[in-house]
Image: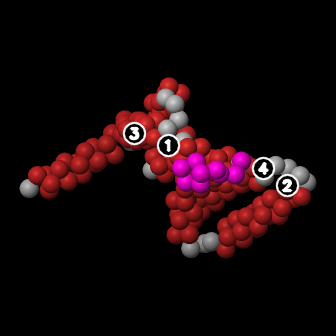
Amino acid sequence: LLFLLAFPVFLETDLLLKLWLSSPPAETSLFLKLILVDAMICTSANPMYHAIMATGDIKKYQMIACSFVLGTVVCFWILLELGFPDYSVFCLSILCSLILLGLRLEFLNRMIDFSTAKYFRVVVLPGFKVVLVSVILPIIVLLNFDEGLLRLFLVCMGAFSSTIFSIYFLGLNVEERAFLNRKLESVLEKIRN
């Protein structure tokens, strides 16, 4: 769901920053895009974090994860001290978020016999399909219209409609789609009455 909101912002970052800040600092657009990527990775890892917390056996996980996060802060400082560009901090943050996601998968596998292969098959692969298909329409709009409010509106509508379509047909399995259909029918009946 974060992708539904983040992707139009990702595509139209420059226009949104111009509307908001008039003359945004030079690297603001890149920073925002990298932060959005990191936020989507972190959001996808949140259910795993809560599953680990639910086991109650969190001491070892917390020690390793917190040490890792503190270590990344030191790495950020080292990168900047060595003269790396500012955006390198965000790139390292994305890498660290991916590593933490892997650590969470490993901890879940050890704690509750969580299948990493099944996670990739049931969660990552459908999500990847959704992203691949849903980006097509907004990118076509982005490439064929001049920057402005009309393009922003069309990109948002294209992203919303293609993402909803992709989630329904590619992201949900048959049972989930049937459940959603029943819920939608129930809501429509309440609206009619």
Q: SS for tag 2?
A: helix
Gap between marks 2 and 4, in whole Å? 7 Å
Whichever of callouts 1 and 2 sits on the residue coming sooner in the sequence is: 1
Question: Which callout, 4 or 1, points to the residue nearer the camera?
Answer: 1
Residue shown at 85% from the left, 50% from the top: 84
Residue type at mark 2: give it. Answer: Leu
Gap between marks 1 and 2, in whole Å? 31 Å
Whichever of callouts 3 and 4 sits on the residue coming sooner in the sequence is: 4
> In the drawing, does residue 80 fall left or right of residue 5?
right
Question: Which callout, 3 or 4, points to the residue nearer the camera?
Answer: 3
Whichever of callouts 3 and 1 sits on the residue coming sooner in the sequence is: 1
Quarter of the image where one finds residue 173: top left
In front here: 188 or 128? 188
Residue indicated by mark 1: 8
Q: Is residue 21 magenta?
A: yes
Residue shown at 67% from the left, 54% from the top: 97
Farthest residue, direction right: 82
Residue type at mark 4: give it. Answer: Ser
Residue indicated by mark 2: 79
Gap between marks 4 and 1, in whole Å? 24 Å
Q: Is residue 44 magenta?
A: no
Gap between marks 3 and 1, in whole Å? 9 Å
Q: Residues within 10 Å of mark 1 (few under 14, many from 20)?
A: many
> In the drawing, does residue 154 fall left or right of residue 75?
left
Residue indicated by mark 4: 88
Counting from the top left corner in percent of width and height, residue 122 is at 48, 43
In front here: 154 or 179? 154
